[in-house]
Image (cartoon, helix red, strand yellow):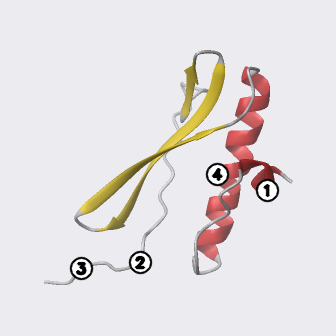
Amino acid sequence: MSTRTTPRLRIRINADNPDHHLWNNHGTWFIHYTVHPTAFTKERVRRSLETPLLAVARERRDAFLAHLQAHASAGGAGRPCQSLRQAAA
């Protein structure tokens, strides 16, 4: 039996829901997604988008997911940036 040792990126986009991966917590928007570091484990990640504005939250989510995709395409060495502002820049 083989086990995967490097995470793979799969981003699911729901065309019927433009707010997919977004969650409003008391007026502040968060991005939430699940990481599968191995074939047998998963980790739910929630990070603040630091905005009360839905339009800004969507832009930051899109920038962060694009950053994750680029990081994975580059071989995924190390961890992707921790700051959503870095990803959006």
Q: Residue furthest right?
A: 89
Question: Pointers 4 and 2 in contact (CB under 8 A)?
Answer: no
> Which SS class for mark 1?
helix
Q: Quadrant of the C terminus?
A: bottom right
Residue for badge 2 = 6
Count residues near mark 4 (Cα–Cα under 10 Å), then give few for <14, some for 14-19, many for 20+. Answer: some
Residue for badge 3 = 3
The residue positioned 75% from the left and 27% from the top of the image is 51
Tag shown at residue 65: 4
C-alpha separation, residue under disc 4 versus residue under disc 2: 18 Å
Question: Pointers 4 and 3 in contact (CB under 8 A)?
Answer: no
Count residues near mark 2 (Cα–Cα under 10 Å), then give few for <14, some for 14-19, many for 20+. Answer: few
Quarter of the image holding residue 61? top right
* Between marks 1 and 3 in the image, the one whose residue lies nearer the viewer: 1
Tag shown at residue 86: 1
Question: Pointers 1 and 2 in contact (CB under 8 A)?
Answer: no
> Which SS class for mark 3?
loop
Name the amino acid, label 1. Answer: Gln
